[in-house]
Amino acid sequence: MSRHTSQRADWGSVTEVEHGKRYRLRYWATVDGVYARQSDTVHGTRRQAYDRLAELRIEHTQDAPCPTVGECWERWMVPSFDRRVANGKLSVSSLNAYLSSWNAHIAMRWADVPVEDVRALDAQDWLDGMSREAARISLMLLRQTLDVAVKYEIIEANRLSVSLDMPTRVVTGDKGIWTVDQLVDMWHGCEGEWWEAAYILAAFGGCRVGESLGPTARDVRMVEMHGVKVAVVTIERQILKTGAASDRLKNKWSYRSVVVPGPMGERIGEIAARSDLTYLTGDGLGGTCSQDTLNKAWAGFTSAEGREAHPFHNLRNSWQTYSRWVLCLPPWVTEKLMGHVGEGVTGRNYDRPDWELFADAVAKAYAEHPFGTIRDELGRKRIMQAV
């Protein structure tokens, strides 16, 4: 009966296939001009197997040099990421973050370095020049690349498996938010703009940037509860920075309905009712609008007329804040509306509200604490004062 046990030599490995009779050798060598993993079989004793491995090492001492970090990245890491995206184990946004980190921080320093020459002290010097978050992601990816090199027996050990000091410098983005009155005022300023629906979904529905671009007219349902008309919008796709539509959201809890109350919700209904629209915010021809295009339009809008300028994604932070402090929605409601898992075991496994419960909670809160504008029969606007 055969046994499969493997031992590494200084170069290559020897695996026992049949006890005392047959051994498999694995090593890296150039064959027909291609440097790749090779194998050989020895019928004989373990000693003979190791002698044969030693002979092969002598034969191939002048072969191609050890693969570089960049070659390992392209050969194994990128295809692995693609497979994980395809089977749902990695989000597109995470993949883009990894590729961005490779291009911005890893490639210039390590792409041409043979994996056997990567040293911990060199990596420490490299990390010291980064922010803490950039260093965290970059080191993780570099370590994973070396782990793959160990897996394929290119190197004996990952020299970056030791503890390294992480930078303390933190790069903080713009954390500013707008008040609900400012949000309503900006809505008046962008009424009729091609990106108005995306603004409403982010400012008054709590959507992420890509989520605000994803809904189509078919995703909108208009209902009335507690005397308040609300738009219930199904979130089941996002638009990426490139403009591509993706049905993969940040996590499984991101697939949800968001509720836009009052006149803002009615406006979403008006936009959705246009027969010539597919996406509520699109390119005007039935196609998608990229996040980059939206962010550029938003930057131009907020830089004009003395408006308080913050990134578009801060609309979501603003929504979370006023939903708790103006609408007085409880946190277990706002967490679910944002597409978060919720608190504790209950939030993760048992709390599963449907769109009607969402609509009821938001409509009731808005009826008690209204804001925004409504149109009278002449089309004029008046401000609704909070109760």
Image: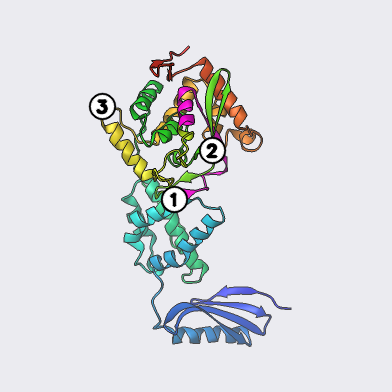
CA distance for labels 3 and 1? 33 Å
Residue 212 image offset from top left, x and y in percent = 45, 38
Of labels 3 and 2, earlier in sequence is 2
Tell which tag, 1 or 2, sits nearer the viewer: 2
Image quarter of residue 179: top left
Q: Which residue is at a point 38% across and 68% down the rendered structure image?
A: 117
Answer left or right for 21 relative to 109: right
Cα distance in 3D space between marks 1 and 2: 18 Å
Residue 355: quadrant of the picture: top right
Q: Which numbered disc flags the more N-terminal residue, 3 or 1?
A: 1
Which SS class for mark 2?
helix
Q: Residue at x 39, y 59 (%)?
A: 120
Between 126 and 195, the residue placed more toward the observer is: 195
Q: Residue 307 location, x and y as percent?
A: 29, 27
Q: Is residue 281 above or below residue 4?
A: above
The kind of residue on which mark 1 rests is: Ala
Residue range corresponding to the magenta coloring: 245-270
- Asked if residue 170 can be seen in this view, the reply is no
* Quadrant location, the N terminus: bottom right
Identify the element where label 3 is drawn: loop
Pointer 1: what residue? 244
190 sits to left or right of 341: left
Residue underneath mark 2: 219
What mark, if any, has residue 306 been given in the picture? 3
Q: Is residue 39 part of the magenta span, yes or no? A: no
Q: Position of residue 251 (x, y in %)?
A: 54, 44
